[in-house]
Amino acid sequence: EGDSESSKATPSTGWGPMEATWRAGTLPFRLAHNTLALNWKARTRPTWNKQLDQAVVSLKTCYCNTPLNASLIRYIADRSVPASLIPDNVGRVSQDLGGDLKVAWTFPGALKHHADAERFILYVHSPFYTSSGSSIRGLTSRLALACTAAVLTVDYRSPPEEERESAVQDLIKAYRWLLTQPAVTPANVIVMADGLGAALALNVLADLRASEAAAGHADSSLPVGCAFMSPWVSLADASPSWDKHGATDFLHRRGCGFF
């Protein structure tokens, strides 16, 4: 899982200055056109609602028409879910673990405190997002409500600005801290992740198992399970899925090169 120098290089847009300016300048009109077009065209997939279709099309439009960098990708991805769609019947609490590492709890509003939950989820979001963006807050809010669980997200040091190992260390620190919290035991914790976050989560689980084996503890502190949504664990960028699902995948190959 080591990072190569080529993976750290900023991908070229392949555009000249005039084309880059034209694409960025016309982006608001392209996004407005998307909104109008979705009022009459069929859904990209029959099971998608209008809001999801709008988010996917707008993300792809932004990826294809802006001179991207990691910060801009996060800005776009964090806002792909409007704040108005985030459930409001949840509680949220942020905590500082020290060393510039912060975590956030999301739990059902029916509970007075996250420690009142019977199950806990450590959610590892993709470095495409931040834990405070509306996209991840919307997802973790729905997870908390659907699972009647307290969901913990970590504001870890993200690639590509930081080495992947730094992200893994932050997540391990957060997991070990989680196990010290009231009502939390490995038996009622699962690790969940999406996209590239799944690769980080697998690194975390592998490192935890290795440290347990070295200490002779027989996996005593490992979570009871893990669950990944659309995991991106092959970082070779060679999967035929890129082409097969290009019409419906909101991730664009061009944007993924930054991570």
Image (cartoon, rainbow, N blue to C red):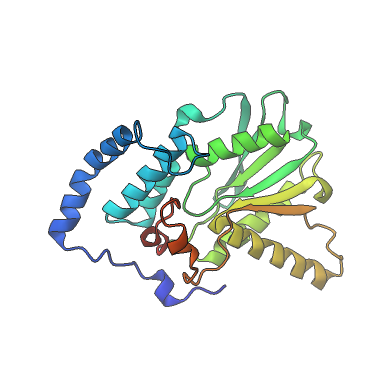
Which residue lies most toward the left here? Answer: 18
Q: Is residue 226 visible?
A: yes
Q: Residue at 50% x, 66% y: name it.
A: 163
Figure quadrant of residue 19: bottom left
Q: Is residue 80 visible?
A: no
Quarter of the rendering occupied by the N terminus: bottom right
Figure quadrant of residue 103: top right
- In this rendering, would 104 be left or right of 32? right
- In this rendering, would 51 be left or right of 153? left
- In this rendering, would 152 be left or right of 196? right
Q: Nearer the viewer, residue 56 or 44?
A: 44
Total numbered labels placed on residues in the image: 0
- Residue 249's x, y, as percent? 45, 53
Q: Is residue 92 above or below residue 95?
A: above
Q: Residue at 50% x, 68% y: name it.
A: 239
Q: Is residue 145 above or below residue 252?
A: above
- Residue 217's x, y, as percent? 86, 65
- Residue 152's x, y, as percent? 65, 43
Q: Residue at 57% x, 54% y: name it.
A: 230
- Residue 232's x, y, as percent? 55, 61
Figure quadrant of residue 82: top left
Q: Residue at 16% x, 52% y: name it.
A: 21
Quarter of the rendering occupied by the C terminus: bottom left
